[in-house]
Image (cartoon, helix red, strand yellow):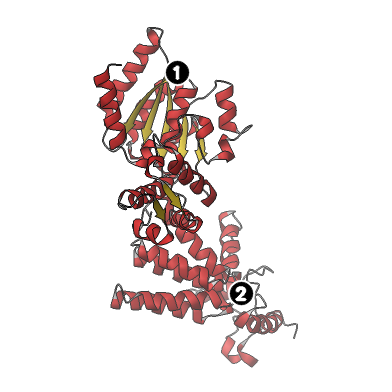
Amino acid sequence: MSLFEQAEAENFRRAQPLAARMRPASLDEFVGQQHFLGEGKLLRRLLQADRLGSVLFYGPPGTGKTTLARLLAVAGKRRFRQLNAVTSGVKELREVLHEAQTEVATGGSKTLLFVDEIHRFNKSQQDALLPDVEDGVVTLVGATTANPFFAINSALVSRSQIFEFQALANEEIKTLLRRALEDKYRGLGRHQVTIDEEALDYLADVSDGDARRALSALEIGVLSSPERPLHFTRQLAQESVQKKAIEYDASGDSHYDAASALIKSLRGSDPDAGMYWLARMLEAGEDVRFLCRRLVILASEDIGNADPQALTVAVAAMQACEFVGLPECQYPLAQAVTYLACAPKSNASTIAIGEARADIREGRLLPVPRHLRDSHYQGAKELGHGAGYQYAHNAPGGVAEQDYLGVDKEYYRPVDRGFEAELAARLAVIRQQLKGTQ
């Protein structure tokens, strides 16, 4: 490399943000994801056996997906090529694949193709990868923040190992921050910075496991402070952190995960957790109608007759949201969430309809008992329809001794919670009256 090229490379390095400069140069420097990269874990074993095939990296931003892809190329002695699915089309993809084929055919190295945001490729673009992936011409590493089982073709998923990246732990973030402060060439070591432990704790905590965000805040704090040596305090850390945009795809994985967390919190009778997940979804711009539908469903599915008022509250909240709109509709939503969380729970009605429909789907079809058949049309009585029917209002207590199903079957089994406990006692008496045993 000439002096001119060295100068260009140095200028380019200095222009890079701290997070880019501090990317690890080897797998030993890589922090996090030890559940699949640690000694004896699957990805490490694939590398050691030189059997790395196509893989999909799935997880939140700032957890090292791009960095690890580059390190895998180095460790596997492969040429590294990168595409971004947002800006690249089939033409660019085919060019890279043709280049990889030529390289292998002429005795060169295999290629590791890293496709960032691979879920943005359409079906035809994803299909274009399949032949070369199967032939081993390229080692595909696809990165996505969306659940690959939802966002990526099943054919590509079936040919790939999936590794789920987890948000970095606070101690892992702090390790990266300390490393950046000590490194005089790539990091901030030449700036003479001493940092308070509580400042490190704050940066690690607010980064939400995103190393890029933590390193960016550290760099902003150091470069925007003229005094040297610099005492990096918690206050300076607070001033250097921007508000994080909430990661939320209204049609993707985070949408369904948050909705699941909300419903499970209410089902589990935790109003505090329910309030958090409601707030999280509202702040992310969730469709209010979707929230209302989920609350109405839960009111019947998980509360039912243990508190019949729950459905009334949920429906009223839905109607109120249509009437007042955002932001004020957060109040009836919050009222409904807290009420539903604290209400006694029963899924007895849910189980009952499920069992009844299962019987019908499995072919257990019962004829309508003759005494219950419609007898209002001409000729019905000649067929015996309605014969022997007992009018319930004429019976003592409004319950006649009568069979309404034709078989001895109980679908509805009330629980002993809330109002349903009263229904259970009442139903026990009613069933005796129906059978004439009382």
Query: Which of the 4 quarters of the picture holds residue 336?
Result: bottom left
Q: Is residue 167 visible?
A: no
Circles 2 and 1: CB atoms closer than 8 Å: no
Which residue position holds label 1? Answer: 135
Q: How many marks?
A: 2
Q: Is residue 35 visible?
A: yes
Of the pair 223 and 192, the residue shown nearer to us? 192
Specify whether 162 is left or right of 414. left
Q: How far from the left and from the top, in percent, is residue 188?
A: 39, 42
Task: Measuring from the top left, give residue 12's x and y in whole percent.
Answer: 28, 31
Crowding at dot 2, Cα within 10 Å, few <14 / some 14-19 / many 20+, comes out as: few
How far across and down, in percent of the image, does residue 13 sit? 31, 32
Classify residue 61 by image quadrant: top left
Please report the residue visible at 45 percent of the width from the left and 70 percent of the height from the top: 295
The residue labelled by disc 2 is 404
Dot 2 or dot 1: first in sequence order is 1
Residue 88 shown left or right of residue 176 in the figure: left
Nearest the viewer among 222 and 94 is 222
Residue appearing at x 69%, y 69% in the figure? 408
Place of residue 180 in the rendered image (x, y in percent of width and height, measured from the top left): 43, 42
Q: Specify the amino acid type for callout 1.
A: Asp
Label 1 secondary element: helix
Compared with 146, 309 (above or below) is: below
The vertical placement of 350 against 169, above or below, is below
Figure quadrant of the N terminus:
top left
Residue 176 appears left or right of 284: right
